[in-house]
Image: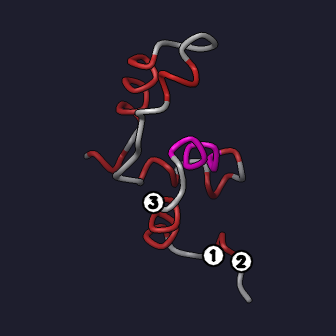
Amino acid sequence: MGNINELCDDLLVKILLQIPTEEVVATSLLSRRWRSVWKLVPKLDFRDYSYKYHATSAAPSEFIDKFLERNTALL
């Protein structure tokens, strides 16, 4: 069986579409190969972000603004 890192970006994006947004973005920490794959995901759900993180990090709007600047799927 092959290594998941050998899959093309299109297949990786299909896999990432099946997991929560928080985990999609966290995949960027896995390896150099995964560092920018999450940016190709066209559908991410930010509804839980403000509830989970409002007291411990940047405002949700700041997070979403930074995400939109980096997400290449939106271009």
- Main secondary structure of the magenta stretch: helix
How far apart are the alpha carbons under marks 1 and 2?
Answer: 6 Å
Q: Position of residue 18 (x, y in %)?
A: 49, 62
Could you classify mark 2 by the number of other residues whose Cα lies within 10 Å: few (under 14), some (14-19), or many (20 or more)? few
Front residue of 54/25: it is 54
Q: Where does the image place residue 28, in percent across and percent down from the top left?
A: 62, 46
Instruction: Identify the residue at the far bottom of this view.
Output: 1
- Kind of element beneath mark 3: loop
At x 36% / y 30%, what residue is drawn? 69
Question: Which residue is denoted by mark 2 in the rendering?
Answer: 3
Q: Tell me the tag on residue 60.
A: none
Asked if residue 26 lies in the magenta stretch, the reply is yes
Amino acid type, mark 3: Leu
Pointer 3: what residue? 17
What range is drawn magenta here?
Answer: 21-28
Residue 34 higher or lower than 5, as above or below: above
Residue 22's image quarter? top right
Task: Tell me where residue 64 appears, x and y as whole percent.
Answer: 40, 27
**Rendered residue at 55%/49% (across/down):** 24
Q: Secondary structure at mark 2?
A: loop
Please report contact status of discs 1 and 2: CB closer than 8 Å, yes or no: yes
Residue found at x 41% / y 33%: 47
74 to the left or right of 25: left
Q: Nearer the viewer, mark 2 or mark 3?
A: 3
Q: Specify which label sits upstream in the sequence, 1 or 3.
A: 1
Tell me if mark 1 has few (under 14), some (14-19) or many (20+) residues whose alpha carbon lies within 10 angstroms of its own: few
Quarter of the figure with the N terminus: bottom right
Sequence order check, earlier mark of 2 and 3: 2
Q: Can you identify the residue that label 1 sits on?
A: 6
Mark 3 Cα within 10 Å, few/some/many (few <14, many 20+)? Answer: some
